[in-house]
Image (cartoon, grey):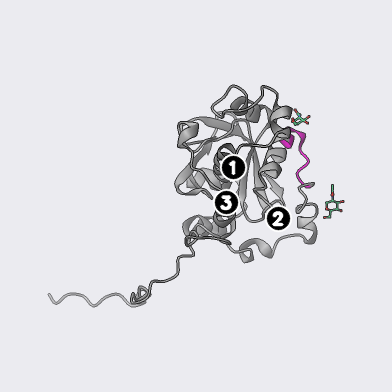
């Protein structure tokens, strides 16, 4: 828990935190997504590839929430996200118009947390899960009704059900049964272009300073480290 807690506080983790325990073949089939072969997630993986949201493959050191085929269908067909067909396979085979693609980028970044590979118990302890989408976009994680079940709730207060995470490419993966949306309506979901998405995920290619990578402004002293000794007591 300690490593994950530190990561939550700092909002970013280095590979070093978890690197020591990682088996050598952890990254096999990660670059081309074939490590993610769960058929329940086939449509979601297809959409993520189509958006080219993860050009380097499945990222490591994240906590990922990935919605099932059926839940993706529920938002794309007759749901809050406007789409061109009532057939999920048709939607996935057609080009996406940029506005929809950019909002879907935001939706998927809202499903990723840069907190290291967290377990369900760690997330229950934390309660709030910061997402890659930005500081205003958190998820809530809680224990569910049944043993070993959990819920993860979005900005609308809608709760997806999940179970313990599995390990995937140095990240942890929670399969969820609802798509989590970062805003009440589709129009309120931020537009995130591919460059900005990469910036939010990796801190690379950013126009604005990336999260946590803000350069120190000149003329401003870094705050001094707290003195080890207690401050002198005031005179009686
Ligand atoms: C994916 O990459 C691995 C190497 O990590 C390779 O062995 C495998 O054949 C690739 N699979 C596909 C479908 O390209
Ligand atoms: C999930 O969706 C994909 C793409 O639509 C489809 O090929 C696959 O068979 C589906 N799997 C399940 C279990 O529904």
Q: Is residue 85 left or right of residue 186?
A: right
Q: Residue 232 appears at what percent x and percent y?
A: 23, 78
The residue identified by callout 3 is 197
- Magenta stretch bounds: 35-42
The C terminus: image quadrant: bottom left
Q: Earlier in the sequence, mark 3 or mark 1?
A: 1
Q: Is residue 38 magenta?
A: yes
The residue identified by callout 1 is 108
Q: Residue 20 appears at what percent x and percent y?
A: 69, 65
Residue at 62% x, 24% y is 77
Residue 23 falls in which quadrant of the image?
bottom right
Residue 204 falls in which quadrant of the image?
bottom right
- The answer to whether residue 95 shows anywhere in this view is yes
Which numbered disc, 3 or 1, marks the residue closer to the eye? 3
Query: Eyeballing the image, is 229 above or below 158?
Result: below
C-beta proximity under 8 Å, tags 1 and 2: no
Instruction: Report the Cα–Cα distance between label 1 and label 2.
Output: 16 Å
Element under label 2?
Answer: loop
The residue identified by callout 2 is 56
Disc 1 crowd rating (10 Å Cα; few below 14, some 14-19, many 20+) is many
Mark 1 and ligand 2: say if the CB distance to the nearest ligand atom is below 8 Å. no
Comparing 112 with 226, the one in front is 112
C-beta proximity under 8 Å, tags 2 and 3: no
Element under label 3?
Answer: helix
Instruction: Report the Cα–Cα distance between label 2 and label 3.
Output: 13 Å
Comparing 68 with 116, the one in front is 68
The label shown at residue 176 is none
């Amino acid at each position: 828990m300690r490593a994950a807690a530190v990561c939550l506080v700092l909002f970013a983790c280095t590979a070093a935190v978890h690197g020591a325990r990682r088996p050598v073949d952890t990254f096999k089939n990660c670059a081309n997504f074939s490590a993610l072969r769960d058929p329940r997630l086939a449509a979601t993986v297809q959409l993520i590839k189509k958006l080219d949201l993860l050009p380097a493959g499945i990222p490591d050191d994240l906590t990922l929430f990935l919605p099932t085929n059926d839940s993706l269908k529920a938002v794309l067909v007759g749901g809050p996200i406007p789409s061109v067909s009532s057939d999920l396979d048709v939607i996935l085979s057609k080009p996406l118009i940029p506005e929809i693609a950019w909002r879907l980028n935001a939706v998927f970044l809202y499903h990723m947390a840069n907190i290291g590979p967290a377990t369900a118990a760690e997330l229950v302890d934390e309660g709030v899960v910061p997402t890659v989408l930005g500081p205003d976009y958190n998820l809530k994680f809680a224990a569910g009704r049944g043993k070993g079940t959990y819920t993860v709730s979005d900005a609308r207060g809608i709760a997806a059900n999940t179970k313990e995470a599995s390990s995937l490419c140095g990240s942890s993966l929670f399969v969820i049964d609802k798509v989590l949306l970062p805003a009440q309506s589709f129009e309120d979901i931020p537009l995130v272009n591919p460059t900005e998405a990469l910036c939010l995920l990796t801190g690379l290619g950013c126009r604005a300073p990336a999260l946590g990578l803000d350069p120190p402004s000149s003329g401003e002293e870094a705050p001094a480290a707290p003195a080890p000794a207690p401050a002198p007591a005031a005179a009686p």
